[in-house]
Amino acid sequence: IAIIAVLVSLLLPAVQQAREAARRTQCKNNLKQLILAVHNYHDVYTRFPGGTTGSGCRDSGLCPTSTTGRSRISGFVDLLPYYEQANLYSQYTAAPQAPWSTGALWVQQLAALACPSDVQFRNPGTNTPSMTNYNFCSGDGSLLMCSVNTEVSPTDPRQCNKARGIFSMQSFRQIRDITDGTSNTIAMSEHATPSTTRGLGRVAETGGASTDTPAFCRAQFVNNEFIPSVSLVGDVGFRGGRWNDGAAMMTRFNTMIPPNGPSCQEVGSHWGGGMFAASSRHAGGVQAAMADGSVRFISENIDAGNQGAVEVSSGPSPYGVWGALGTMNSGEVVGEF
């Protein structure tokens, strides 16, 4: 019996590693199919989908009863026909509805948007019917991570459609806009959903994202948990809660805090802007789809520059190689990563 126990103890880690390797490969393949869908969309419309699109008002509680598409439809909705979900897309175009978890059209989990390494997807909860592990890159800033049209005034220079990454609110970039080079610009990545109450995948409400720095957000996250004094975003208060919702917390990320770091936003509801990190359940980093269509594994130890710096609206990113990978035309020279 003792010999058998020893053999099991030796074999079990190897089996677990093999299983995770298979899950990671499937996760990479999912991301590859999604970036392929992005390029197929561009071939048809000569532009990329927006990070957040739609028409009408921003909130189902404030809108009249109608078939408006609202203004918080995620880019995954526009891509539906390009990752074998044309039937679902035709239902949406026939009778659009707001992307809330109560809408019958949206309460569907799509296998193409699930990374099998994620705990939630292996053991889904009853109140999380439409999650995603994948997201769009909006650049290296938090001020421009708008989720609603009213988040900044029309005269504010920090307009929602001026994020420095490929995908932002109500803005449709073209491949020619990526002057930093498509192999040096991240289009999509992944995020983990939470396996613990205050762990990776939850979002802290820190207030004042306009003055916060990545270092401030990271200081609230100790030993892979948010410290007890920090309030967490309520409602669907975690990353990737709804694949159809274009709110930044749900389906976008920025390259400020390095991979597998925490996420913080300025308000206690899920529609605010903030710092949203790429994250995963893979050991050591995340997978990212580049704008050239390749998928690369990026270490959580990648150079992230000056984490105490406030974001910039022009020029090179202050957040090192990681920040530079998020911008599409800021003139950085990206080295090895």
Image: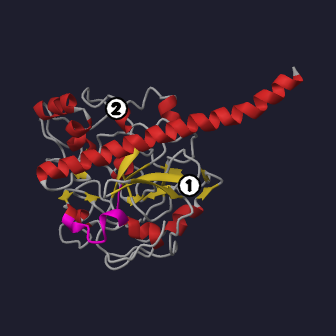
Q: Is residue 267 above or below residue 92?
A: below
> Relative to 4, is 166 on the left or the right?
left
Count the labels in the image: 2
Q: Secondary structure at mark 1?
A: loop
**Residue indicated by mark 2:** 110
Q: Nearer the viewer, residue 285 or 334?
A: 334
User: Is residue 108 shown in magenta?
Assistant: no
Which residue is rendered at x = 28% and y = 61% of the image? 166
Looking at the rendered structure, the secondary structure element under dot 2 is: loop
| Farthest-out residue, right | 2
Query: Residue at 16% of width from left, 56% of height from top?
Result: 47
Label 1 vs label 2: CA separation? 33 Å
Give the mark nearer the N terminus: 1 vs 2: 2
Q: Which residues are magenta?
A: 176-187
Quarter the N terminus occupies: top right
Which colour style is shown? secondary structure
Residue 193 location in percent, x, y?
48, 42
Q: Residue at x 44, y 61 (%)?
A: 207
Mark 2 neighbour class, 10 Å CA radius: few under 14, some 14 to 19, many 20 or more: few
Q: Which residue is mark 1?
A: 230
Q: Quadrant of residue 137?
A: bottom left
- Front residue of 46/137: it is 46
